Amino acid sequence: MASVDASAPRRGTGLQSLERGLTVVAAFSREHPRMTLSEVARMTGLTPATARRILLTLEELGFVRCEERRFSLTPRVLSLGWSYLSSLDLWEIAQPVMQDVAGRAGETCTAATLDLPDVVAVARATTRRIMTMNLQVGGRLPAHATAMGRVLLADLPEAELERFLATAALAPLTEHTIREPAALRRELTRVRRQGWALVDEELEIGLRSVAAPVRGADGRVFAALNLCTSSGRVSAAEVHERLLPGLLDGADEISAALRRRQEPPVLRLAP
């Protein structure tokens, strides 16, 4: 989970208790799934007394549990994310289009948005194929090593892209992963020019994916549509010749629907 700096100066008239509560929730992560009161206080920079009050409040609300003096998040925390996703409404437009793209391609179709340094899957349409990309809605992948991420990164404002390239840890996930900022910038320039991205075994050996941009009424890319396949089963040439045209058509269809609605681009999860 991304951290929140409780000691950072607040702007405007923010509610300090809410800020501190979110700081505590954000302190839990894969590396720190269960923590004592002292550990939470140290991780957040809060006093033990303040951390204790917040943890007890979160426990009372059902967002935290305590076992053997160690606190951990409960599944109820997911309701915060579901509230965001379920308040959005593009799923009604995107779902049938994605299902059609997936059906014609015979591969899983995923939509994702950017939450630097990752992409977050917000919608998914599967096929009957036994072996599919195991990325569920809400799952995260590093933006620099995914086709979806590169489509989204390529449309970032220049200043924001510069900050990302200057600070991001471009982890070498495979021997093929682009790990140098200059090389990634060149690839993003190519993606921006051609209007789609192909990533070949950079995220995982044996995995090949292609992504296309979904644009809102303002023309900006706010989501990426992706098809993922096995590199041993489908060649890069076949991805380009057979999968890419349908993917581009699907992304354009969703984008056109958004332009007709003239509303902010958003995504809804399937019921």
Image (cartoon, helix red, strand yellow):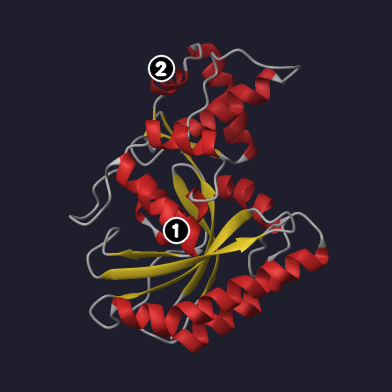
Seen in the picture, residue 168 relative to 218 is either above or below; the reply is above
Give the crowd class for mark 2: few <14, some 14-19, many >=20 residues within 10 Å: some
Which amino acid type is shown beneath numbered disc 1?
A: Val
* Residue 99 place in picture, x, y as percent: 57, 81
Amino acid tagged 2: Arg
Nearest to the observer: residue 260 or residue 61: 260
Task: Give how far across and how far down residue 76 sits, in percent.
Answer: 58, 48
Q: Are marks 1 and 2 in contact (CB under 8 Å)?
A: no
Tell me which residue sits at (26%, 75%) in the image: 231
- Decide if residue 142 is in sight here: no
Residue at 55 percent across and 50 percent down: it is 155
- Residue 246 image point, x, y percent: 52, 81
Whole-angstrom CA distance, mark 1 to mark 2, is 43 Å
Pick out the residue farthest to the front. Answer: 193
The residue indicated by pointer 2 is: 42
User: According to the image, label 1 marks what residue?
Assistant: 191
Ranked by sequence position, the earlier of labels 1 and 2 is 2
